Amino acid sequence: MAEADNKKNAQEIRRYLNIANHQGHPTAEQKLAEWENFWKLNRLEKQEQIDLERAYALQKKELYKQAFDLYEQLSIEKKNANAFSNMGHLYCLGLGVPQDYIKAMKCYRSAVEGMNVAALTKMGVLYQVGLGVPQNYDKAMTCYKTAAERGSYEAFFNLGLLYRHGLGVPQNERQAIVCFNNAVAFEVLIEPDGVDEFVQTKLTEALTYLEKEHYAAALTEFLFLVQINHPEALFQIGMMCLKGLGVQQSETNAVKYLIEADENNHPKAALMLGDSYLMNSAPERLNKALTLLEQKKYSTALNQFLLLAQINHPEALFQLGLMYMKGLGVKQSDTNTVKYLTQAHENNHLKAAFMIGESYMRRSIFRRETPQALIWYKKASDAGNGEASYRIAELLIEANDRDYAEKIRHYLHLAISQGQLNAQKKLTKWESQYSWHLSFVDLVVEKEPLGLKGDEMEDEKL
C-alpha cells in the first residue's frame, strides 16, 4: 500500500504504520520515516511537474515573461533541468527577456548537468552557428553525437545536415542518409527525403516569429538555416539588415546576404539589389539559366530569365518566349510567346522576328494566321535571316500562283545568299516543276494574297 502511493490512502498508511510501531514491530518506525520522506518528495515532485507544465502552457500562449519567471523559480529552487533548458531557449530567441546567447549557453550547460538531452542539442546549434561562443563545428558535432546517443531525433537531423552540406566534416551523403534514417526511426521524418519538409517547418517557425515582430527569435532561426544556404533565410536576414529589424541597420550586410540569396536562386533577391547588380551579373546569370534549361530545371531557369527580363535582356526575353511557346515549366501560352519574343525583337534579338512568324504558323488554322506570320518573316528576312527568306518562298510556292514566280525566285536566291542550306535544292526543284493554279490562300485574302502587299510589304521589295 505504501509503494502504491495513493493519496486517498495516505492517512490509512500512516495510521497502520503507527499502530504497528506501538505494537512493537521492529521495522515499523523506520518504515514510517521512509514513507513520510517518500511522500513529501513525491508531493514536491508532483508540484514541480505541475509548475513546469504551467510555465510551458504560458509559453505556448506567448506569455513569455510569465513563463520565464516560473522557469527561473524552478531552476533556482529545484535545479530543474527542464526549466534551465527552457530558460536557455527563451534567452536564445529573446522571448520575454532580452536576447542573450551567453546566458542561453549558461542555462543549457546547467540543463545538461541535469541530463537534459534537448539542451545538449541546443548547445550544438550555438556552437554550429557561432552564437554566444566562437563557431566550432567539432564541438557542435560532439554535442549532436552525444545527444543522438541519448535519443534526440533533432540531433540526428542536425548531424545529417552537417554531413550533407560538408559543415566541419567532409561532405558525405551516405552518412547523412544514415542520420536521417535514424530521425525516421524517432518518427520525426516520414521518410529520409522528407528532410526538405522538416527544413520548411523550421522556416515556417522563423517566418511566424518575423510576422509577430519577434525579430530576435526570427533571426536565430534564420541563422541556423543560413548554415545550409537556405535561400529564403538568406533573403530574410538581408531584408532585416536593410530595415534594421532586430539587428543594426546595415546596407553592407544586407547586400552580402541578398547576394548569397541570389546565388542560391532566390527569385526576389536580385530585384532588391537593383538594376546595376542585374546588369553586372547578367552574363554569368544567363549562362547559369541556359545550363539549367539544358538540365530541364525549368522552374529555376524561368526565374533567372524573368530577372534578366527586368533589364530587357534580349536573350532572356527570347528564351522566355520559347519556353511559353513549348510549355517548358509553364503553361503553353501564345499570348506570352508573342509578348516576350516581341520584346526580344524590340531589343535587337536577331532570331526573335523569325520565331514570332513560326509562332503564328504553329497555331495557324486554315492559314488564317499566315499574313501575320509573313509580316514577321519579312522583318527577319530584312535582318538577314535565311530561314525567314526560305519560309516566305515556301509559303509563296504553296500558294501555287504564277504571279508569285519572281517573288519566289527572289526569296530563294536571297535565302541562298544568306546561307540557308536547303534553298538551292528548293530552287532547282521548284523551277523544274513550274506549274500554277489558284490556291485557297488567294480566296481567303482576296486582293492582297498572303498579306504581302500594303504598308508592311511592298511589291517592289518582294
Image (spheres, grey):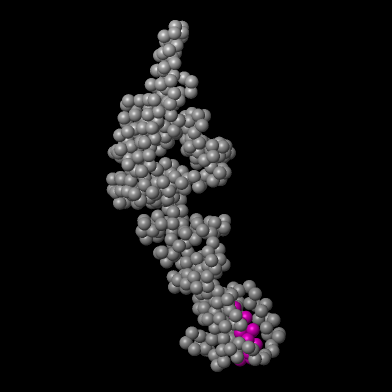
Q: Is residue 314 magenta?
A: no
Which contiguous range is marked in magenta?
Answer: 391-405
Is 3 placed left or right of 427 in the picture? Answer: left
Image vertical order of residue 111 relative to residue 172, above or below: above
Q: Main secondary structure of the magenta part?
A: helix
The residue drawn where x is 44% and y is 8% is: 23
Q: Which of 124 and 76 is in front in this view?
A: 76
Q: Quadrant of residue 108?
A: top left
Residue drawn 31% across and 51% down? 242
The one nearer the camera, 282 or 68, is 68
Compared to 132, does 434 lie above or below?
Answer: below
Residue drawn 71% across and 85% down? 432
Q: In which quarter of the image is the C terminus?
A: bottom right
**Residue 404 lies within the magenta run:** yes
Q: In this view, does 397 lie above or below 99?
A: below
Given residues 138 and 447, the one toward you in this image is 138
The residue located at (44%, 73%) in the rendering is 346
The location of residue 176, given as percent across then percent down, is: 54, 38
Q: Percent x, y for residue 329?
A: 54, 61
> In the picture provided, is 127 more to the left or to the right than 378?
left
